[in-house]
Amino acid sequence: MTVLSPRLEEITECYLAVPRGHRHLRLALRYGDQVLILPEAVVAAIARGYVDILTHPQRRAVAFRLLKLDERKEGFAEFQLLESPEEEATIAAHLARLLEQAERP
């Protein structure tokens, strides 16, 4: 597995929009000669986790896992990234290991 961790100054462009012909947002990040495009469901999970950690008096980490949902609200995709019950210390340790493996573009 390749782990990339670009520095802020290496991300030269960031676009967030609903592309023509699509119904959902996409987020595009350009770093070096690479572009990563994320679907709206991933951006939504990131936003939920970000807000949850910043506004919760104790929470310091959150993880999401891909689940297939048979029942869901209208307009939601069959597959969703939903909060995982992992312990915060486990999540933080996993992220630390990934950062140690990270390659810089």
Image (cartoon, rainbow, N blue to C red):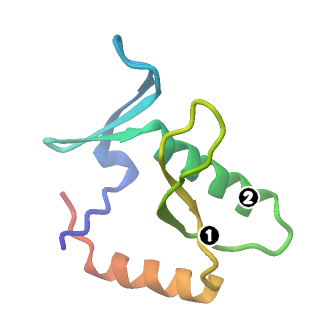
Q: Residue at x 49, y 40 (%)?
A: 77
For this orientation, the residue located farthest to the front is 70
- Residue 71 lies, with reference to residue 25, above or below; the image says below
Left/right placement of residue 60 relative to residue 35 reads right
Q: Position of residue 69 (x, y in %)?
A: 54, 54
Residue lying at the far top of the rendered structure = 20
Residue at 44% x, 83% y is 94
Q: Residues within 10 Å of mark 1 (few under 14, many from 20)?
A: many
Residue 74, image x, y percentages:
63, 32
Q: Residues within 10 Å of mark 2 (few under 14, many from 20)?
A: some
Distance from Cα at disc 2 to Cα at disc 1:
8 Å
Q: Residue at x 54, y 81 (%)?
A: 92
The answer to which of marks 2 and 1 sits earlier in the sequence is: 2
Give the number of marks.
Answer: 2
Say which residue label 1 marks: 62
Check if mark 2's residue and mark 1's residue have beta carbons within 8 Å: yes
Q: Name the amino acid, label 2.
A: Asp
Residue in front for this viewpoint, 77 or 24: 77
- As helix, strand or loop, the secondary structure at mark 1 comes to loop
Where residue 96 sits, quadrant-wise, is bottom left
**Which numbered dot is residue 52?**
2
Q: Can you say whether 101 is above or below 40 in the image?
A: below
Secondary element at tag 2: helix
15 lies above or below 53: above
Can you say which quadrant of the picture contains the C terminus?
bottom left
Amino acid type, mark 1: Val
Question: Residue drawn 45% across and 21% down?
Answer: 17
Q: Say left or right for 47 vs 1.
A: right
Can you give x and y, in whole percent of width and height, for residue 57 in the image? 86, 69
68 or 55, which lies in front? 68
Q: Quadrant of the N terminus?
A: bottom left
